[in-house]
Image (cartoon, helix red, strand yellow):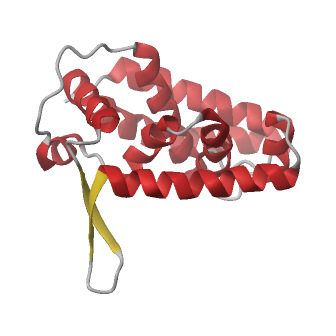
Amino acid sequence: MTDKSALLRSVITEYYGFLKAYLIRKCKNEQDAEDIVQEVMLKLTENFQRGKEISNVKAWLFQVSRNTLSDFYKQMSYELKEVPKELGPSVEEHCGLTAYDYLIPMISFLPDKYAQPLLLSDIEKMAQTQIAKEIGLGISATKMRIQRGRVKLKELFEDCCNIEYDHQGNFVSCTVKTSCTPLVSHLSSFQKKYC
């Protein structure tokens, strides 16, 4: 066994149980959590095989888990029959949702030309040079798309959420505005399916 495969095995051994527990708490279904954590570990293995360096393995694993969980929800194609008029903070509290959990769905609401590079950069922590190759743009155009994507995401976040700051201007919490139909639909789907 090479040093690289030994390192990979130790990372999987160390984090598998933590990720599975986290995902069970998020999706309330042990088999779904098992499927998702296996997919995350497959992504980790592929990154190791490609020689990609991950500076903070724990943060990377949890970010990829959130992204994979979001993709899982999309694949389920859960159809909403009715969107409730009021979601209230109890959904977020009961399901353990945080503002970070809104980001991936909100990124997906952006035009694809901004969403794809932003997901790769800020969620999957891919280097901008790699993103440029993957989406077929020059590095300066890629950087501009990521920057514009961040601005558009911030505007969308401010439009969709009532944001609470402390007296020093630091983010404290947020609740989703009922006028933000796409995010309300996403949370309603999550609530009906998993809460």
Answer left or right for 163 relative to 85: right
Q: Is residue 43 left or right of residue 191?
A: right
Image height check: is 74 above or below 56?
Answer: above
Q: Which residue corresponds to the image point at 71% horizontal and 40% vertical from the top-left?
A: 8
What residue is at 76 percent from the left and 55 percent from the top? Answer: 143
In the picture shown, does residue 35 fall above or below 45? above
Looking at the image, residue 78 lies above or below residue 170: above
Q: Is residue 16 visible?
A: no
Q: Position of residue 149 (x, y in %)?
A: 60, 50
What residue is shown at x 32% (from left), y 29% (from top)? 27
Q: Is residue 93 visible?
A: yes
Q: Position of residue 185 (x, y in %)?
A: 28, 29
**Of residues 181 and 34, the one drawn nearer to the viewer in this rendering:** 181
Q: Position of residue 184 (x, y in %)?
A: 26, 36
Q: Residue at x 18, y 25 (%)?
A: 83
Horizontally, residue 2 falls left or right of residue 15, namely: right
Q: Is residue 152 left or right of residue 112?
A: left
Q: What residue occupies the far bottom of the structure in this picture?
A: 168
**Picture quarter with the N terminus:** top right
Tell me residue 55's x, y (percent).
70, 58
Q: Nearer the viewer, residue 43 or 180?
A: 180
Q: Is residue 109 above or below residue 14?
A: above
